[in-house]
Amino acid sequence: MLRLLDAVIEIYIILIVIYSLGSWFPQFTANSFFDFLARIIEPPLEFIRRFVPPIAGLDLSPAILIFILIVVQHFLR
């Protein structure tokens, strides 16, 4: 069970990276895959943004979310 959760967290981290990089390129945001990513990734990012606003125009919420997920993975192992 822990291996499955570890794998799900790893996939989620990869999706966060894809979503973050894709947001820099408008041509990638106009498809159903990006809409799917936004639906599953934006809720935790919005929660983090309530506590950590963008600094000098740089949104750190994806990095913070990835850090939190890596810490959770560490405790699962």
Image (cartoon, helix red, strand yellow):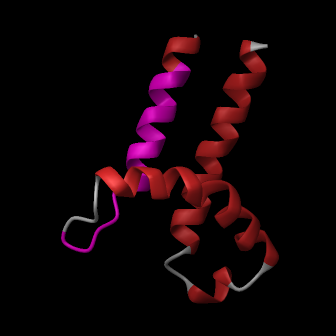
Q: Residue at x 52, y 64 (%)?
A: 20
Q: Position of residue 24 (x, y in %)?
A: 49, 78
Q: Position of residue 46 (x, y in %)?
A: 47, 58
Determine whether 76 is above or below 58 in the image: above
Q: Residue at x 59, y 44 (%)?
A: 13
Q: Position of residue 21 (x, y in %)?
A: 52, 68
Q: Which residues are magenta?
A: 56-73
The quarter of the picture where residue 68 lies is top left
Number of residue marks: 0
Between 53 and 74, the one nearer to me in the picture: 53
Determine whether 52 is above or below 65 in the image: below
Determine whether 35 is above or below 74 in the image: below
Q: Residue at x 28, y 53 (%)?
A: 52
State left or right for residue 69 relative to residue 37: left
Quadrant where the C terminus sits is top right
Please say whether residue 23 is one of the residues in the magenta stretch.
no
Quadrant where the N terminus sits is top right
Please say whether residue 60 is one of the residues in the magenta stretch.
yes
